[in-house]
Amino acid sequence: GAVVSQHPSRVICKSGTSVKIECRSLDFQATTMFWYRQFPKQSLMLMATSNEGSKATYEQGVEKDKFLINHASLTLSTLTVTSAHPEDSSFYICSASKQGSNTDTQYFGPGTRLTVL
Amino acid sequence: ILNVEQSPQSLHVQEGDSTNFTCSFPSSNFYALHWYRWETAKSPEALFVMTLNGDEKKKGRISATLNTKEGYSYLYIKGSQPEDSATYLCAPRDKIIFGKGTRLHILP
């Protein structure tokens, strides 16, 4: 149980286009979902935390107008990279949590590799 | 800002040997510490959630200890097997800050 899927796994797009990444909890309801990005040889960096039905909480330095997050249901959150540029190329990974508390386990998706040309 | 350090960054261990590595974190405002295992081409998988000073958790051949006063946790693997090859990540909560991980390679 506790499977999280992410789609697409890989995307290549032209500079200036927008890209949407979906994160789904397949067999449980996720009160809270988290979005991370990872640069090469760096750690996972939390971008934002989203709770179902409310606005996402963005980490310092993450542009909310650039990285639009929607958590419309208890099983789906989306991250849209708007007007993507080459510097947005990265590995994006989501996780989902049943309760969202400090001790609650995060179940991760497999990640999305974004390449912006 | 939290600073989470994991050491070593990379580790090569002979199959059958035991090993351990460290996660250090600021001890103030501690809530919980999470350990994850991340195998290549797979999703990170939760190993342990630890909350109390002196906590020790075990899952098969893998165990972890926690010292919240000095701000460190050890992960131990007994009798390493090829399937243990992965990157091991730690992350303290309240603020979610991941360490860079320890990349473990088990040599046959």
Image (cartoon, coloured by chain):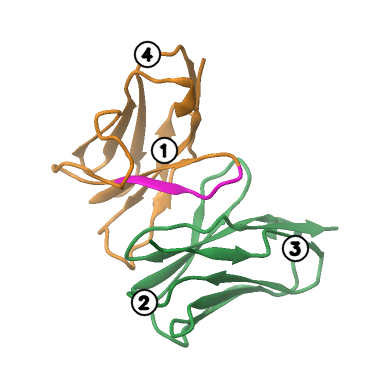
Q: Is residue B4 above or below residue A73?
A: below
Judged left or right of residue B81, residue B57 is: left
Chain drawn green in the picture: B
Q: Distance between the residues labelled 4 and 1?
A: 24 Å
Q: Which kind of residue does numbered mark 1 sit on?
A: Ser
Q: Name the residue under label 2.
A: B28
> Is A69 colored magenta in this rendering?
no
Judged left or right of residue A94, residue A74 is: left
User: What residue span does the magenta drawing correspond to?
Assistant: A41-48
- What residue appears at the point 82 percent right and 65 percent down from the top-left corner? B15
Instruction: For chain A, give the colour.
Output: orange
- What residue appears at the point 36 percent right and 77 percent down from the top-left corner? B28
Q: Are marks 1 and 2 in contact (CB under 8 Å)?
A: no
- What residue appears at the point 86 percent right and 58 percent down from the top-left corner? B108
Q: Is mark 2 on a helix, strand or loop?
A: loop
Q: Distance between the residues labelled 3 and 1?
A: 28 Å
Q: Which of marks 3 and 4 is in front?
A: 4
Q: Name the residue under label 3.
A: B81
Q: How far apart are marks 3 and 4 (CA)?
A: 45 Å
Q: Are marks 4 and 1 in contact (CB under 8 Å)?
A: no
> Is A42 colored magenta in this rendering?
yes
- Using a 10 Å C-alpha cutoff, classify the residue at mark 2 as few (fewer than 14 neighbours), some (14 to 19) or many (20 or more): few
Q: Nearer the viewer, mark 2 or mark 3?
A: 2
